[in-house]
Every structure is written in C-alpha cells, then in structure tokens.
C-alpha cells in the first residue's frame, strides 16, 4: 500500500472541497415563475414570482409580522424588503441572461411586492435589462437559478411566458443548458428559456 505524500493529500482534500461546494445542499427552496418582458425598444427585463418554502417563509414572516395575524401589511412587507434583496443583489438577483458570449448586468429591481399565500412567502419583482431590438434576430438565454445551490430555485421554464408589443417578433422554448460553457457552474437539471427576437 502506497502512502500518499502530504502534497498529494492536500490536493485530494482541495478537490473534495470543490466537489462539496459544487453540490452543496440547499438551505432555501424557491419555486419560480418567469416572464420575459419586451417593450418597443427591445428586451426590457424579467418578471419573477418566487414562492419560498414553508420553513424559510415562517422564519421571515415571524420577523416582520408585528401584530401576529399571519399576514403581511404594507408596512410589515417593507420591513422584509431590505433583508431579502440583500440576499439577491450580489448575484444579479439570480437572473442570468446570456447574450452572445457574456452575461448581462441587471439594473436595480423594480415593482417589488411581498405577500403571504398559503403560509408561504411570495416575492414578485422585475429585474430590468436592456437589449435593443434590430432588424435581424437577437438571441438570449434566460436562467433563474443559484449556481452555488445555496438557494434551490426551481424555475418552471416550460410554462414561462413572454410579454411583447405587436411590433416585435419573439420566438422561445425551454431546454437544458448542455453545451453552453458559461453555464457550466449550474447543476445539470437547470433549464433555460431560449429566445430570439427582431422587429416585424
């Protein structure tokens, strides 16, 4: 039996840590619905509706529900917004938009709404982006997920929707991320929404 050198053991430990990080167990679970938004100028952003798991929901609601009625008033919702958004801001709000060979940088979120449905915390928010429409097709891939898997975001891309004015032609479908090297950090079960759009 060969005894591994200290250096070899250190390399194996490092590789093990990388594997553990890549397949970390999630601490928060989210069911996400997605809508791609277009205006007359082109791609304008992504409308997100996140429904959190019961345990995370209960913890967050308990911190803000001052009158203990199990609901969130407008004032109580405002208490939660900074904490929840702080978890998302540093990661592009977990909205990853591939345009060509790079990810788009999100603008600050708009139209944030927090409510409780069936004892679960629901977060509605728009993540603004900007991709002008042209005479030829532009292509995008939208992924709503956490590559670290700390937050397990399950996006129902098969039922994702698109809202676009009549002046823009949009085609879209959902599929795996296989072959897209920029998404190699994401778990293999994550799907993307593939779009192409142009002026009519």
Image (cartoon, rainbow, N blue to C red):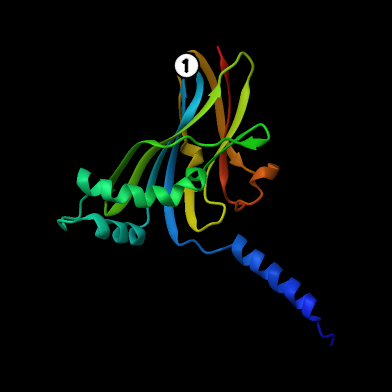
**Of residues 198 and 159, which is closer to you in this image?**
198
Quadrant of the snapshot with the N terminus: bottom right
Secondary structure under the numbered disc 1 in the rendered image: loop
Above or below, comparing residue 134 to residue 161 in the picture: above
Q: Is residue 12 left or right of residue 57?
A: right
Q: What percent of the width, then of the height, locates residue 191? A: 57, 44
* Residue where numbered disc 1 is placed: 40
In-image side of 115 versus 144 (left or right): left
User: Residue at left 56%, top 33%?
Assistant: 173
Residue most extreme to the bottom: 1
Q: Residue at x 54, y 22 (%)?
A: 170
Q: Is residue 12 depicted above or below 121 in this figure?
A: below
Res 97 → quadrant: top right
Q: How far from the left and from the top, in percent, is residue 77?
A: 26, 47
Q: Residue 134 falls in which quadrant of the image?
A: top right
Which residue occupies the foreground of this view, 119 or 87? 87
Residue 178 can be seen in this image = no
Residue 112 in the image: above or below residue 20? above
Task: Say whether residue 103 is left or right of residue 88.
Answer: right
Q: Quadrant of the image for the C terminus?
A: top right
Q: Position of residue 20 (x, y in %)?
A: 61, 66
Q: As displayed, is residue 199 above or below residue 127? A: above
Query: Left or right: 78 with respect to 31?
Result: left
Q: Is residue 49 visible?
A: yes
Expressed as whole percent of the image width and height from the top left, the position of residue 44 reads 48, 26
């Amino acid at each position: 039996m060969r005894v591994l050198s200290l250096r070899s053991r250190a390399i194996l430990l490092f590789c093990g840590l990388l594997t553990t990080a890549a397949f970390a167990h999630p601490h928060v679970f989210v069911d996400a619905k997605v809508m791609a938004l277009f205006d007359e100028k082109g791609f304008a952003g992504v409308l997100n509706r996140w429904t959190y798991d019961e345990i995370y929901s209960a913890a967050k609601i308990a911190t803000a529900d001052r009158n203990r009625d199990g609901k969130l008033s407008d004032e109580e919702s405002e208490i939660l917004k900074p904490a929840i958004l702080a978890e998302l801001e540093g990661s592009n709000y977990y909205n990853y938009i591939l345009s060509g060979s790079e990810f788009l940088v999100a603008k600050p979120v708009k139209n944030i709404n927090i409510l409780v449905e069936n004892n679960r915390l629901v977060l509605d928010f728009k993540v603004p982006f900007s991709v002008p429409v042209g005479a030829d097709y532009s292509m995008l891939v939208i992924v709503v997920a956490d590559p670290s898997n700390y937050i397990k975001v399950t996006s129902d891309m098969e039922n994702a929707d698109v809202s676009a004015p009549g002046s823009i032609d949009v085609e879209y479908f959902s599929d795996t991320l296989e072959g897209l090297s920029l998404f190699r950090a994401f778990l293999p079960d994550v799907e993307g929404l593939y779009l192409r759009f142009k002026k009519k």
